[in-house]
């Protein structure tokens, strides 16, 4: 461990930390280094590296090979999955779920209840390689960014909106809509979406099923699921 | 190793396992845990994590930092490369090759001889965040999913078909065709494709060169390769 | 370490190497194995694996979980970030920066001062699965490939050009232009691009700000940055 200069780590009670987790890793950037603090009940899986100068809330969970850079503030009940990186200087709210193979660029703002699907890429440079006006987007509360989508620098994605799979979001997205494509365009209000199996209403006032009472009352379909004709 | 609760692992003969490989990792999901079984001649590279409650066949090979979650069944002669994850509850056939930085969502079916190129993202939620009708696609035998493409939930990709680079597959793909785009559309029959260098017929009855006699008789071009004019 | 057959490693002075870095990893391919040589002042972060039969210049830096396969030649002052892989047989120039979650396919040529943004995927097979005419693209000096873009086999990306986010580059790109889309098409000369905040000229003769005198004279905007109306 002779080459690894780790700083103080303040860890809440009740944590589970796998072997091969590095906490308090020191950035090469010339900043004032403060401790890494993580709230109670963290579950950190093998290969996770969390830098010093980071504050994280309670019930934080990582998958394998997650990297969280310095100067990040992350709220309570967040989860970040395999092979994802939060670059430095971001603010992440509560109950945010960031899936596999995601990259979040420096100075991105992610509000409460946001979901980033696998492979999402968040950018922050309007014209690479210049960092003079570099800033990540703002993903507002409850927004969901679909699998393998890109959100460009300085963009604001509105509350409870959904970005469809494989999209490139180049300008602001209003509240409560579905956008799709490259560049992403509004398709409909989110509440107009239907479930292909008709078992739930996917969004009510933009709120997904997991945050509504149906979550506890509607039974999941039995797998393997067969699609209805014509869907 | 005090925080890592590993279960029994049944490993076939003739394996090569790097340091920093974790076998029999226990999921946080509340399921009945069974052993991890891996057939003979496995080659598992550093950073690989394979959960308990997984069955894998013979001659299994991983790259670095591969994660295979619980309740997966994987056949013989499969390879999964760097930084890829197979999420839980999938069925993978024989001779499947999954390249770098791929994510395979829960409850996906991948048949024999399938190829997932680098960066492929497989989805399973028709309307996130709801898992009531969640199920991954079915990629039928011999299908090839091109680099950085997405395949959406419940879709069936037909036998021996090819999804072009950077596509988003939103509905079923017939057998033996090339589809491209977002949403992906049929371009031609696969057998109509030609090699830009004219040295092989890329697909015959949808079967690629590696599975045909030409594989042993046609010499590879000498690199660096110069393209013919106009290609 | 009993299953890991490492070969000789020749390391320059002044290096910093984290724990859990593997140097001189032996490929399974049947090639003549030569030492791994890395120039002075390398900084290699945890989870990095560099194979034998690789030559790397001075001031080389990796993020976490980077894999560099065999038969690669990499110049001076290069950096490769988290969860990225350089597959075998590539040539990489000086001052190349490869960001997170990137895959560079076998036999790719990357010239000096190239930037690959996060999630970039470089392909090398015109018709998978055949390797008879397999060769990666040539990314010429100063070219910048945008976030989550794909560059296909045998393509030449011209000097100082920029590929916009989420593009698929299917044919050659001229010098000094912006291309966007799938397939990527020329939008304008790079020098015509403006900064949304008007604080710099993004490209002069195709050269970005970081390689021009403005880099030292223009102050960065103070964050959080507010966009001008209508941008």
Image (cartoon, coloured by chain):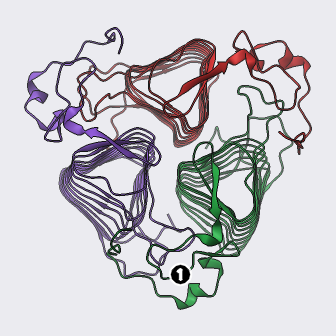
Chain colours: A red, B green, C purple
x and y percent of residue A186 in the render? Answer: 58, 22
Compared to B14, does C60 lie above or below?
Answer: above
Say which quadrant the C terminus of chain B sits in.
Answer: bottom left
Classify mark 1: residues with Cα within 10 Å, few (<14), some (14-19) or many (20+): some
Left or right: where does residue C213 sit relative to residue C74? left
> Pointer 1: what residue?
B200
Q: Secondary structure at mark 1?
A: loop
Left or right: where does residue B72 sit relative to residue C5? right
| Residue C43 seen from this side | no
Q: Label 1 is found on which chain of the structure?
A: B
The residue nearer to you, when weighing B214 against A224, is B214
The residue nearer to you, when weighing B172 against A49, is B172
Left or right: where does residue A124 sit relative to residue A158? left
Compared to A75, does C96 lie above or below?
Answer: below
Q: Can you tell which quarter of the image residue A177 is in?
A: top right
Left or right: where does residue B121 sit relative to residue A28? right
| Residue A177 seen from this side | yes
Give the residue furthest to the bottom.
Answer: B217
Total label count? 1
Compared to B140, does A154 lie above or below?
Answer: above
x and y percent of residue B203 in the render? Answer: 62, 74
Instruction: Tell me the residue at 50%/34% (across/down).
Output: A182
The residue nearer to you, when weighing C92 against B219, is B219
Instruction: Tell me the residue at 71%/27% (across/down).
Output: B128
x and y percent of residue C153 in the render? Answer: 42, 63
Compared to A88, does C90 lie above or below?
Answer: below
x and y percent of residue A68 in the render? Answer: 45, 30
The residue nearer to you, when weighing A210 against C126, is C126
Q: Can you tell which quarter of the image residue A33 is in?
A: top left
Say which quadrant the N terminus of chain B sits in.
Answer: top right
């Amino acid at each position: 461990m002779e080459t690894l200069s780790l700083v103080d780590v303040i860890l809440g009670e009740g944590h589970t930390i796998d072997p091969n987790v590095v906490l308090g890793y020191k950035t090469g950037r010339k900043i004032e280094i403060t401790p890494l603090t993580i709230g109670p009940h963290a579950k950190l899986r093998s290969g996770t590296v969390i830098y010093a100068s980071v504050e994280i809330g309670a019930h934080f969970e990582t998958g394998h090979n997650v990297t969280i850079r310095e100067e990040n503030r992350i709220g309570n009940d967040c989860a970040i999955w395999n092979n994802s990186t939060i670059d430095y200087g971001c603010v992440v709210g509560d109950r945010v779920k960031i899936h596999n193979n995601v990259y979040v660029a420096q100075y991105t703002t992610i509000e409460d209840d946001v979901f980033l699907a696998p492979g999402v890429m968040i950018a922050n440079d309007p014209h690479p390689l210049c960092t003079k006006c570099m800033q990540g987007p703002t993903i507002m509360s409850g927004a969901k960014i679909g699998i393998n989508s890109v959100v460009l620098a300085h963009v604001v994605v509105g509350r409870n909106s959904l970005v469809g799979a494989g999209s490139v979001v180049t300008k602001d997205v209003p509240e409560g809509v579905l956008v799709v494509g490259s560049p992403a365009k509004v398709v409909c209000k989110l509440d107009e979406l239907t479930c292909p199996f008709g078992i739930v209403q996917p969004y009510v006032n933009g709120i997904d099923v997991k945050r509504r009472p149906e979550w506890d009352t509607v039974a999941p379909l039995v797998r393997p699921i067969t699609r209805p004709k014509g869907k």
